[in-house]
Image (tube, grey):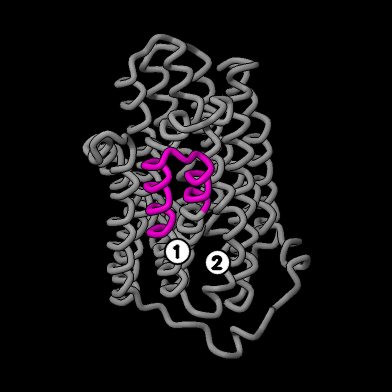
Amino acid sequence: MELSRRNVAVLSGCQGLLLINNSILITVNALAGYALAPNKAIATLPVTMYFVGSAISTIPMSYLMKQLGRRAGFTVGALCAVIGSLVCAAAVYMGDFWMLCGGVLVLGIYFAAGQYYRFAAADAADVEFKSRAISLVLAGGIVGGFIGPETSKLTVDLVAGTRYVGPYLTLVLYAVLSVLVLRWLHIPRLSESERRATGRPLAIIARQPAFIVALVCATVSYGVMNLLMAATPLAMMACQHPFSDAAFVIQWHVVGMFAPSFFTGSLIHRFGLTRVMLAGVALNLVCVAIAVAGVEVMHFWLSMLLLGVGWNFLFVGATMLLTETHTPAERAKVQGVNDAAIFVTLVVSSLASGALFSFQGWQVMNYSAVPVLLLAGAGILWLASRRRSVKPV
């Protein structure tokens, strides 16, 4: 148990460093893209390329970890962050938009690798500690929500005469720090037989109700969160709220996403997995109701805070549920497919967010989240019903 808790602490630290990376990129990617884009209509392409890089690398990264182990896979991801960050810094310095897109694409590999921190925590924990391990690793992300934006503010003009180079250079330092922290991670590699084994075909695994619900809830949680979060600064700007208020709202959204992780695992242990996941769906629906009720700062603040908490309950629950559907030999393909679906959803939702807001407006965009949230809720109730029906008398 002591080794398990140490691994969780290391992974939580790595999660914090990953979210620092993400927060900095959220802050500067669109701005750097706008400054360099030959056509301002594609200014947000670097943002989308980050998710594209993650989507195309998540399955290969999962199989790499199966063969070489978790620590080796995470180290490769962090080294890709070093390379991608240096390319981005050079691109901004030289004023090359397409080079910037390429660098961000490579940075996406780091995000793909980092998504497996939560699964690595589950691998290293016993059944009783598993839900807490997953949530505690995600809790490390709250650090990034505060340090990332502050780093961007302090380094945006670090290189004289060339804005935005500084934040990309600091990403190199955080990635190197992640490599160093990983030296304390000790998760046994799969045995030779487990590395060679393929397990059941994915088509058979995917028929399990738990797999279906886990995949639906993971993609819905991330899709709805990204759809509404990405458009919130635009909506606040349209309502004449100052940038400082938008930054305040997004910062508290990040707190809502990761602070509950300190107790989400305990809630699952006490009240059950499906109840906590249903609470996540309910909080997302309340978020929508508040968002469409008004456009004062407090409406945005409360809706984004609840959106973050709802994402946490639903995503941690979906992660825990997915770990029940596969053997060690099968986890590479199961976890890879799950996270690939999440990243494809992020690509689509990041593109849809701006389009829906621009052409349909804030309220319609929020209402568009309701059907998929109801689908996730129905899936959870279906799973809970099936589990009750097979419960021993």
Neighbour class for label 1 at 10 Å: few (<14), some, many (≥20)? Answer: many
* Residue span colored magenta: 81-105
Which label number is shown at residue 61? Answer: 2
Foreground of the two, 392 or 16? 16
Task: Check the picture and name the quadrant holding the N terminus.
Answer: bottom left
Residue ID at (21%, 37%): 154
Say above or below: 65 vs 135: below
Secondary structure of the residue carrying tag 2 is: helix
Q: Amino acid at mark 1?
A: Gly
Q: Residue furthest front?
A: 94
Q: Where residue 389 appears, x then y in whole percent?
A: 70, 57
Residue closer to the observer: 391 or 37: 37
Please name whichever residue, 83 or 152, is drawn nearer the observer in this view of the structure.
83
Quarter of the image for the C terminus: give it.
bottom right
Q: Are marks 2 and 1 in contact (CB under 8 Å)?
A: yes
Q: Locate residue 33, reporting x and y percent.
A: 47, 34
